[in-house]
């Protein structure tokens, strides 16, 4: 069955520290992979997407993600976290072809940033 | 930057009542979606809509749910007879292509009492 797992429900990092949020997926076909961010009271904003090609994908707000097919993972990284990055982060996968646009989301990771 | 607009931002309804959640997708987008997020749980796919018909729906999207694009700008989700377990944040999204560059709205929080 298709599934997305974000092992860390809650992460706290100090401002200026590096960040890595984990995401593992189980998917039968070649997936499309996404990271979204949700600030309190806001909608879901697309940070980055991976379709094919380079395994290191650059996104907005200084985020990047590394896709590792052998590990079925797409971890989100940022070299230096800012207080405004505190939010909830969702990993999602979609079907690579013949699709209807459906995304399967992970349960999210809440990021807290300490001053 | 173009936005997906959802109204209302918060709706409280009594169990058994019908509710309509409204969305205005980005004007040139062709693919439309509804998702929901029960408090503390995952964001779940409900339905996708293209070319004036449902292209896929989840098992959550039973006969109590329907979607409509009544004119060129609105996309609505109707729940015919709400249940307590329908309480959730409902997100509308749209995209120009099936490339998943969705733009989500900020959601409608539905509370069924």
Image (cartoon, coloured by chain):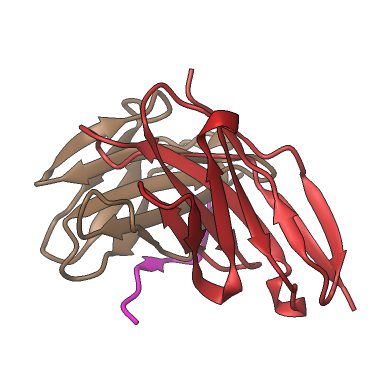
Quadrant position of residue A49: bottom left
Quarter of the picture containing the N terminus of chain B is bottom left
Whole-percent x, y for residue A72 in the image: 56, 32
Residue A113 lies in magenta, yes or no? no
Quarter of the picture containing the C terminus of chain B is top right
Query: In front here: B24 or A6?
Result: A6
Whole-percent x, y for residue B85 in the image: 58, 34
Quadrant position of residue A83: bottom right
Is residue B74 visible to us here? yes
Residue B6 lies in magenta, yes or no? yes
Whole-percent x, y for residue B74 in the image: 22, 62
With A99 as the anchor, is A25 left or right in this view?
right
Q: Colour of chain A?
A: red
Is residue B80 visible to us here? no
Residue at 59% x, 40% y is A106
Query: In front here: A31 or A83?
Result: A31
Compared with A29, B89 (above or below) is below
Query: In front here: B92 or A90?
Result: A90
With A74 as the anchor, is B45 left or right in this view?
left
Residue at 74% x, 74% y is A80
How many marks the image carries: the answer is: 0
Q: Give the chain letter for brown.
A: B
Whole-percent x, y for residue A97 in the image: 24, 34
**The furthest residue to the top:** A1
With B38 as the anchor, is A51 left or right in this view?
left
Residue at 39% x, 65% y is B6
Q: Magenta span covers which residues? A: B1-12
With A87 as the anchor, is A52 left or right in this view?
left
Quadrant position of residue A103: top left
Compared with B108, A68 (above or below) is above
């Amino acid at each position: 069955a298709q599934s997305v797992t974000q092992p860390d429900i809650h992460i706290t990092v100090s401002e200026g520290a590096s960040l890595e949020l984990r995401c593992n997926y189980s998917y039968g076909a070649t997936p499309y992979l996404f990271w979204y961010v949700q600030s309190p009271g806001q909608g879901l904003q697309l940070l980055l997407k991976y379709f094919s090609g380079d395994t290191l994908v650059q996104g907005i707000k200084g985020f990047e993600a590394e896709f590792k097919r052998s590990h079925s993972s797409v971890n989100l990284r940022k070299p230096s976290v800012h207080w405004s990055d505190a939010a909830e982060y969702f990993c999602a996968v979609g079907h690579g072809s013949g699709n209807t646009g459906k995304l399967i989301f992970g349960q999210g990771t809440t990021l807290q940033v300490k001053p | 930057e173009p936005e997906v607009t959802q109204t209302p931002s918060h709706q409280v309804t009594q169990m058994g009542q019908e509710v309509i959640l409204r969305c205005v997708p980005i004007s040139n987008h062709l693919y439309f979606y509804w998702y929901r997020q029960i408090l503390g749980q995952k964001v779940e796919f409900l339905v996708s809509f293209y070319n004036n018909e449902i292209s896929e729906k989840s098992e959550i999207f039973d006969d109590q749910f329907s979607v409509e694009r009544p004119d060129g700008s609105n996309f609505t989700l109707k729940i015919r007879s709400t249940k307590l377990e329908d309480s959730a944040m409902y997100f509308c999204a749209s995209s120009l292509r099936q490339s998943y560059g969705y733009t989500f709205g900020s959601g409608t929080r539905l509370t069924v009492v």
